[in-house]
Image: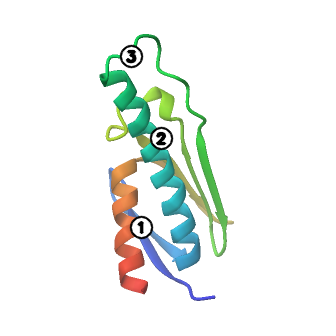
């Protein structure tokens, strides 16, 4: 199993850690699925369908390797998929970092990582 460094750009600074290409693909798939579901709900709302927005399930991803990574998003609190943010928690036995990051920025970081390791 190949491991390379992934850098996630956060609102203030960045975090770089060991991550596998397979885990990056899985996380990207989860986040892209969340983005697509959110786009579909937004499209329904803008199409003029009456009623409330149908609640979407939250997305939670966990990875355990050299570090523990958790990415969580409740899409119901964001007005559009492009305004959505995810809570990123990165920890090991000595340090813990939790920060909100833009969903689209995390997807971009994953895409760059996957291009680099391909």
Name the quadrant of the N terminus: bottom right
Dot 3 alpha-carbon crowd within 10 angstroms: few under 14, some 14 to 19, many 20 or more: few
Q: Nearer the viewer, residue 108 or 96?
A: 108
Please give the label number shown on residue 91. none
- Mark 3 or mark 2, earlier in chain: 2
Mark 1 element type: helix
Can residue 26 be seen from the camera position used here? yes
The residue wearing badge 1 is 110
Residue at x-position 53% and y-position 35%: 74
On screen, residue 44 above or below 99: above
**Where, by quadrant of the figure, is residue 32 drawn?**
bottom left
Residue 23, x across and y down, in percent: 58, 71
Estimate the spatial distance between the alpha carbons at disc 1 and disc 2, rounded to whole Å.
Answer: 19 Å
Mark 2 element type: helix
Mark 3 element type: loop
Which is more foreground, mark 1 or mark 3?
3
Residue 36, x across and y down, in percent: 43, 46
On screen, residue 116 above or below 101: below
The residue wearing badge 3 is 49
Please name the colour scheme applied to the rendered image: rainbow
Estimate the spatial distance between the alpha carbons at disc 3 and disc 2, rounded to whole Å.
Answer: 16 Å
Please give the label number shown on residue 37. 2
Mark 3 and mark 1 in contact (Cβ < 8 Å)?
A: no
Whether residue 105 sits left or right of residue 15 in the image: it is left
Estimate the spatial distance between the alpha carbons at disc 1 and disc 3, rounded to whole Å.
Answer: 34 Å
Residue at x-position 54% and y-position 55%: 30
């Amino acid at each position: 199993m190949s491991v390379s460094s992934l850098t996630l750009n956060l609102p203030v600074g960045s975090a770089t850690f060991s991550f596998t290409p397979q885990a990056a693909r899985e996380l990207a798939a989860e986040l892209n699925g969340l983005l697509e579901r959110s786009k579909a709900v937004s499209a329904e709302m803008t199409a003029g369908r009456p009623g409330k927005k149908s609640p979407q399930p939250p997305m939670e991803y966990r990875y355990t390797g050299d570090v523990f990574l958790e990415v969580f998003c409740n899409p119901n609190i964001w007005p559009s998929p492009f305004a959505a943010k995810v809570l990123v928690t990165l920890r090991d036995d000595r340090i813990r970092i939790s920060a909100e990051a833009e969903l689209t920025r995390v997807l971009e970081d994953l895409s760059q990582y996957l291009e680099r390791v391909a």
